[in-house]
Amino acid sequence: MNTDKSPEIKITKTKQSNIGNVDFGNLPFGQVFTDHMFVCDYKDGKWQQPEIMPYQNICLDPSSKIFHYGQSVFEGMKAYKDDEGKIFLFRPLENQKRMNISSQRLAIPEFPEDYFMKGLSELLKLEKDWIPTTDGSSLYIRPFVIATGHGVHASASDAYKFIIICAPSGLYFSKRIKVKIEQYYSRAANGGVGYAKAGGNYGGSFFPTQKAIQQGYQQVIWTDDATHQYIEEAGAMNIFVRIGDTLMTAPKSERILDGITRKSLIDIAKDEGIPVEVRKFTVKELIEAQKKGELNEMFGAGTAAIISPISGFGFEDTDYELPEIKNDYASRLKKRITDIQYNRADDKFGWRFEVK
Ligand code: PLP
Ligand code: COI
């Protein structure tokens, strides 16, 4: 990994904060951004001196490869503030590592761990007052890399920009979602980029999702591209289902994003004594369980949405409803994970990272 020697960060503060114009009691998800951003350029074969600067537009040559070939990756993280004003991140090194796994697949140079962690920490210390504390809110953090090299030759760029922006945010979904089990479009295929957080994976999902929305659903459940029989992901979330008392989730694969929320929930569920099965399962199994009254819960899990309960699913022109049960796993697991994230409970797994 090529870098200049140390990640000495040049900091230029804003002259005029925008914080007074933000309604913290009524925050949308990912719409309002903080005063500063972290930027680091890659050129001449190495990452240059990182900078924190006022949030601003970026100016790029129209031939930059990001515009033509979509060479980009991103991450999604959150910062939380506890009652004493201490700032926490949740398993940030997992995001840092995954970003480099994604970068490798997109032929983007890896971003060094010390640059990532120092840049993020310095930015968060500067934006401390922007971390909301109202129920269900947090500071959503979006690190991303784009190809800025010039020229429309279809090959990897020789220049990149790594940027971190932050958005004080409320809930991603405010109520249970109704999903469509996708039988035609695919999010990912073996040998493809499904396991990477590549911008294009999301761009490619918008059209099938729009169609599902027109049909009365809020999200698409992705199935395997070869047979469309196996349940894989829930939009931009990993998927969990509860049949009887067993909690199931699809195993990691080349087509599935290795979600940090997913793997944390598996550990928490096991710790709670919940029977957990990580295995492939089919649409047919879900329908049979639903007909027998054994399909008790389905939910999506991810950083942005945390845990998003599913009210029912559509498959081949039929809608299947899920009951609203007491003592549901979704609420129990959401409480356990958010109590760790917001420093309200013991961190027995060692997942919390204090920014100081
Ligand atoms: N699956 C996809 C396709 C995603 O975009 C995300 C969101 O990041 C997830 C799963 C959940 O991953 P994580 O829990 O690390 O946010
Ligand atoms: C996240 O959960 O952080 C994501 O990246 C999902 C998203 C595309 C909003």
Image (cartoon, helix red, strand yellow):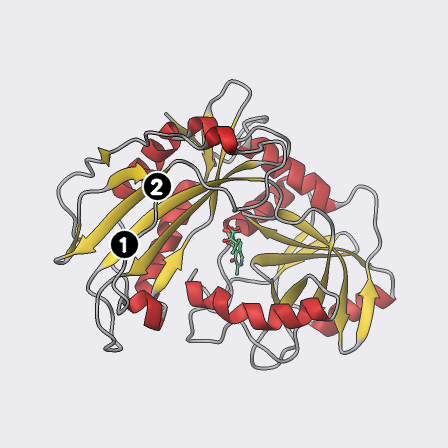
Mark 2, secondary structure of its residue? strand
Residue 97 image point, x, y percent: 36, 51
For residue 161, the mark is 1
335, above or below 237, in the image: above
The answer to whether residue 320 is left or right of residue 264 is right
The type of residue carrying mark 2 is Met
Q: Residue at x 37, y 68 (%)?
A: 70
Question: Which residue lies at the image location 59% right of the left edge and 77% below the top edge?
Answer: 185
* Residue found at x 33% / y 56%: 145
Left or right of residue 204, residue 4 in this image: left
Image spot of residue 150 (x, y percent): 21, 67
Label 2 packing within 10 angstroms: few (<14), some (14-19), many (20+)? many
User: How far from the left and from the top, in percent, is residue 228?
Assistant: 63, 78
Q: Is residue 226 above or below residue 175?
A: below
Residue carrying label 2: 37
Vertical order, 150 against 242 (above or below): below
Q: Position of residue 292 (x, y in %)?
A: 87, 65
Mark drawn on residue 236: none
